[in-house]
Image (cartoon, rainbow, N blue to C red):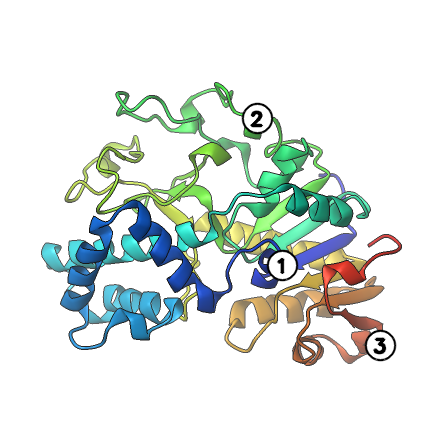
Amino acid sequence: MSHYPKTMLILGAGFSKNFRLPLTSEILTKGYNKVVSEYPNFQIMFLIEWLRLIGGRPFETMNYEEMLSRVDLEITYISDYSDKKVKYSLWKLRDSIIQVLWEALNENLNQDDIAQLDRFFTRLSKPVGIISFNQDLLIETYFERRKIIWSYGIPVSNFTLPRPEKSEVQFLRSKKQNNNARVSPTFNYYHAKNPAYILLKMHGSFNWQFCPNCHDVQILPLVESGAVGRPYKPIGDIGRLCAKPSCMEKIHSQSAYSNLIVPPTVYKNFDNPLLRNIWEKAKRYITKAKSIYIIGYSFSSVDVLANWMLFESTLENNCLKEIVIIDPDENVKNNIERLIPKKYHPIIKRENSLEELRTGNL
């Protein structure tokens, strides 16, 4: 892109809530029930792995954030990670929790959803930068349905071909292949050179996968999105393998590629180079924005990195004309005011919902 977008959207879980996707407090119940309904054996195996990790406390007494935070801390700091049995058990449990997250967020858009998104996006002055803290595929699914030109704002070399048939077990890295999809409309849009929208997903996405060893990233067509490394079902899901010889070895039949997502937990890992690149780009975009719309993201005190990014980027911004907060929580405005220069406080306004923005252009 030759110039920066002048309008920036910052989206949190509250934006997706408009389309029946759950908030953090609702993920465990919604996602777990969906997984168990499809794979009944999941319930037994999940319970066994959880009890192996944490003896007396039932997982039902914890929310999603507490559960995954506990597992991540075990993996990173507490457990004997040199023991392959412990290592495999912990990652098997973590994969199960990620599966719960995916199932909770895996909702189809209906016609009412499309109509509401139409009303919202058709009023935006293009091009638009979108900073999303959600891992769901709501925005890109809408763009694909409406054949809107858009981009993830990441190098084209990261895109991979659609998955071969299950009998084809070897995957080659996309950098050594042509980036032409077999049959996938996604590829017509998300690597566009002059997009109407640039979607920066700060916490990753369920159609992004990476090799934990060399950090090679693959961006998949939306039809192939989902959780990888599922420990119980389906058995035939072999995943993708990195083509580097040093990365080809599989541990306990676990796929080499993992989901490139940063789940909603206390412990957040942004070591992946692609994610760091996205955060740097998001900051640059905010420094040049004339309008910022914050929808369903509270910038709470625990989101340290996001808070710092907003503080630094608005401090460097000399052309900001308006900040619009779309959130029913009145306290969000106070959170934003604590993070931005006082000279911008008079240009902040708040609306309760998307439906209140009925007139004018964003």
**Mark found first going from the N terminus, 1 or 3:** 1
Q: Position of residue 63 (x, y in %)?
A: 37, 71
Residue carrying label 3: 346
Contact (Cβ within 8 Å) of mark 1 with mark 3: no
**Which quarter of the picture shows residue 300?**
bottom right
**Mark found first going from the N terminus, 3 or 2:** 2
Q: Which label sits on residue 15?
A: 1
Q: Is residue 69 above or below residue 211?
A: below
Q: Which label sits on residue 245?
A: none
Q: Which label sits on residue 185?
A: 2
Instruction: Please indicate whether residue 34 sits to the left or right of residue 317 in the image.
Output: left
> Is there any visible trace of residue 326 in the rendered image?
yes
Crowding at mark 2 (Cα within 10 Å: few <14, some 14-19, many 20+):
some
**Mark found first going from the N terminus, 2 or 1:** 1
Q: CA distance from mark 1 to mark 3?
A: 24 Å
Q: Which residue sits furthest right?
A: 360
Task: Name the kind of residue labelled 2 in the image.
Answer: Pro
Could you tell me which secondary element the residue under label 3 belongs to? Answer: helix
**Residue under the image location 44 percent in, 25 percent down:** 161
Q: Position of residue 24 (x, y in %)?
A: 47, 66
